Amino acid sequence: MRRYLIFAAIGPFIGGFLLLLATTVSSGYWTETNWGEVGKFLAAFGKTLPYSYLFGVVPTLMMGAIDDILFHVPRIKPARRVVIMACLGFALAELLYGSRGPDTGALQFVLYGMVGLVPAAISSWLARKYDVEPQPAHST
């Protein structure tokens, strides 16, 4: 159960931040970065955070379910599971967000892929760190 709470709490927060950052960078808004622009960016992030949770909880819970399934496969070690989740998050975020806007290219591919890669990898790593191994059942 902790796994799903970790994914639901961390995924939309980090994913929403990275999505806003990717959209801002790909639109060319940050050609001259100064502290005023960073302040505006953080204010926009604060205003869009409820929407990140509103639209991001279900996809991150689905990623948590996949991580839970992989957790119960004994041959998949924790480090490999984090890599699998990161690759899956990259691919799904790229499919979902990659075609947004008029620009296409390597920068947009990487930026929108990172929106899924980073939260999936961090959530899977934290779930591994704070989850308990399943114990075999013993009959009495």
Image (cartoon, rainbow, N blue to C red):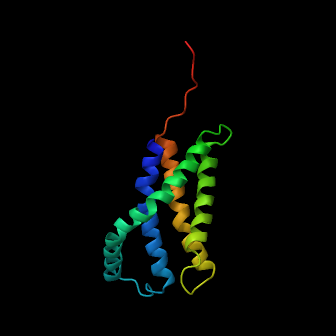
Q: Count the labels in the image.
A: 0
Residue lying farthest to the right in this orientation: 75
Locate residue 133: give its quadrant. top right
Image location (x, y in percent) of residue 20: 43, 74
Q: Residue at x 43, y 65 (%)?
A: 55
Image location (x, y in percent) of residue 53: 39, 62
The quadrant of the rendering that contains the N terminus is: top left
Q: Residue at x 42, y 48 (%)?
A: 5
Locate residue 9: give its quadrant. bottom left
| 56 up-or-down from 126: above or below | below
| 29 up-or-down from 117: above or below | below
Task: Indicate left or right for 29 with 128 as reference.
Answer: left
Image location (x, y in percent) of residue 14: 44, 62
Q: Residue at x 45, y 87 (%)?
A: 31
Q: Residue at x 40, y 66 (%)?
A: 52
The quadrant of the rendering that contains the C terminus is: top right
| 106 up-or-down from 83: above or below | below
The residue nearer to you, when weighing 106 against 47, is 47
Image location (x, y in percent) of residue 19: 47, 71
